[in-house]
Amino acid sequence: MKDKINLIGIIVLLFNFTIFSVLLLSHANTKSLSNLKCITENVTQKQLPSGSIATAKLTTLFFLHNSAVTVINKGAIADQNKLYMVDRTTHFSIKNVGNSNIYHASKKKVDIAASDNVPTGLFENIELDGIDYFYVTNALNNAYIFHGLVLPIATCSTL
C-alpha cells in the first residue's frame, strides 16, 4: 500500500513538473518577440535566370515590433564582375495568424538609400523577398531563428 502511495506521489510530481516545463518553455519562446532587435550577417549565392551566379554579403538588422517588422539590409552584391552596394530598409505590417506563433507580413514599403545601386530585381532574386508568412523561434538566450513556412530565413542574435 505504501509503495502505491509513493508511486502515485511520484507520478503526480512528474506530471506537475512536465506541465511546469511546458509552460515555462512556451513562455520563453515568445517572451520578447515584441520589441525584438537582432542582427545577422550572411553570404548568399544564387544562380540567376540569366545563368550567372550572384553573391550577396549582407548585414541585416531585424526590428520586430508589436504590429510591424523593419528589416535593414546593408552590404554588397557581386554579379558578373560588377559590385553593387546594398543600403535599403523594408517595412512590413504584421498580423498574428489566429492563436499561433505564425505572422502574416503585408503592406510592404521599401526605402532605398541614394548609395544603393543594385539594379531593379537583382536584390529580390537573391534575398527571399516573397516571404509573406513567418514565425520566430527563440533558439538560445540571445539567438533567434526567423522561419518561413518551409525553410529558415535567418538566424540572428539580439542587440
Image (cartoon, rainbow, N blue to C red):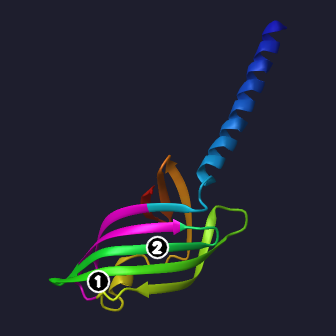
Q: Which residues are magenta?
A: 39-63
Q: Secondary structure at mark 2?
A: strand
Residue sitting at x 59%, y 51%: 29
In-front residue for pair 143/126: 143
Residue sitting at x 64%, y 72%: 67
Residue sitting at x 28%, y 88%: 117
34 is higher (above) or lower (below) than 22: below
Residue sitting at x 71%, y 27%: 14
The disc label shown at residue 71, or none: 2
Q: Residue furthest bottom?
A: 120
State the image coordinates of residue 118 (x, y, percent, origin top left). Answer: 30, 87
User: Is tag 2's residue or tag 1's residue first in the polypeptide sequence?
Assistant: 1
Q: Is residue 55 visible?
A: yes
Q: Residue furthest right?
A: 1
Name the image quarter holding residue 133.
bottom right
Q: CA distance from mark 2 to mark 1?
A: 23 Å
Q: What residue did someone put label 1 on? A: 48
State the image coordinates of residue 15 (x, y, percent, origin top left). Answer: 74, 31
Q: Is residue 129 left or right of residue 50?
A: right
- Magenta stretch: dominant SS? strand
Q: Is residue 64 magenta?
A: no
Q: Amino acid at mark 2?
A: Val
